[in-house]
């Protein structure tokens, strides 16, 4: 049964998080593809800039829900099918929760439903981490918020928080004496790499001082 659980870990979060809230909400509202609008990103920030606050709220709810559910479904599959609780202190399978997160981000970033062109994965990553361990999530959210408040660049806050993400997970794993701390770190590092990779154009614009600040409309 544990083999089935591993298959669920690899496949279910990918398929679930491949359902893109920004694409669906924009399609319902305007009949258009958000990937052809604004920055071209199928995510929360571009939805807010091009579709408004109400549409962005639905995207926020959708992305958080699918990230949280991905982790919960994987955790429950291990608990119900294999009798293993990945959330239990000291569980040697804690890493599968982070692996489910990596699968979820892959699904969101490279969705099979939309020609492998999705969002950048920041919001889904926050949801995943909240579902696994809320304390590192709150710390990283605080860092993200502080950087955005100072710089007014959402992309800068996202990239810095992403880079710090695996190290935060590792530090907490060491503090909690987790036997999976390096496995958790590896899965988190993959997630961080994906987020930074998806922000490569933003990084170029930041270096060229052409990146749009928060609240600034796309033209």
Image (spheres, rainbow, N blue to C red):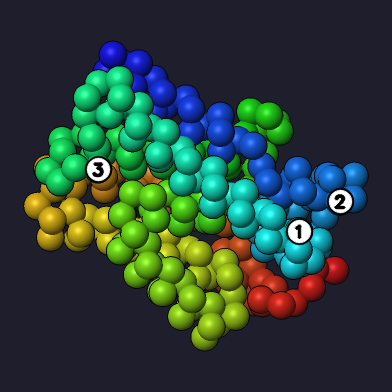
- Name the side, left or right, on which 167 lies relative to 102: left
Of the numbered discs 3 and 2, the one sitting upstream in the chain is: 2
Q: Is residue 56 left or right of residue 140?
A: right
Percent across and percent down for residue 6 are: 33, 22
Q: Secondary structure at mark 3?
A: loop
Q: Residues within 10 Å of mark 3 (few under 14, many from 20)?
A: some
- Give the residue drawn at x 74%, y 67%: 53
Residue 204 seen by the camera: no
Work out whether residue 141 or residue 86 is closer to the camera in this orientation and state it. 86
Q: Is residue 22 above or below residue 107?
A: below
Disc nearer the start of the sequence (3/1): 1
Which mark, residue 29?
2
Name the element at disc 1: helix
Q: Separation of disc 2 and disc 1 at Cα?
A: 8 Å
Q: Which residue is mark 3?
A: 87
Q: Looking at the image, which residue sits at the far front?
A: 80
- Quarter that holds the N terminus: top left
Q: Pointer 1: what residue?
A: 55
Q: CA distance from mark 3 to mark 2?
A: 39 Å
User: Is mark 2 in CB contact (under 8 Å) with mark 1?
Assistant: yes
Residue that lies at the very extreme toward the left in this rendered image: 177
Q: Quadrant of residue 10?
A: top left
In the rendered image, residue 56, in percent from the top left (x then y), is placed at 71, 61
Compute the Cα span from label 3 to label 1: 34 Å
Badge 1 crowding class, 10 Å Cα cut-off, few under 14, some 14 to 19, many 20 or more, is some
Residue furthest to the bottom in view is: 150
């Amino acid at each position: 049964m544990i083999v089935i659980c591993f298959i669920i870990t690899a496949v279910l979060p990918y398929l679930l998080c491949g359902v893109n809230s920004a694409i669906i909400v924009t399609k319902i509202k305007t009949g258009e593809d958000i990937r052809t609008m604004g920055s071209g990103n199928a995510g929360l920030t571009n939805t807010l800039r091009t579709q408004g606050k109400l549409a962005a709220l639905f995207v926020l709810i959708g992305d958080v829900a699918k990230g949280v559910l991905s982790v919960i479904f994987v955790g429950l599959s291990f608990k119900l099918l294999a009798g293993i609780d990945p959330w239990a202190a000291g569980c040697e399978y804690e890493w599968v929760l982070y692996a489910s997160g990596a699968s979820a981000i892959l699904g969101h970033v490279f969705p099979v439903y939309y020609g492998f062109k999705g969002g950048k994965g920041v919001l889904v990553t926050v949801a995943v981490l909240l579902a696994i361990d809320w304390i590192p999530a709150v710390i990283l959210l605080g860092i993200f918020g502080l950087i955005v408040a100072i710089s007014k660049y959402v992309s800068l806050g996202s990239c810095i928080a992403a880079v710090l993400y695996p190290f935060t997970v590792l530090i907490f794993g060491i503090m909690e004496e987790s036997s999976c701390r390096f496995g958790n770190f590896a899965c988190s590092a993959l997630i961080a790499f994906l987020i930074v990779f998806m922000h490569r154009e933003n990084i170029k614009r930041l270096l060229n001082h052409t990146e749009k600040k928060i609240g600034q409309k796309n033209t």
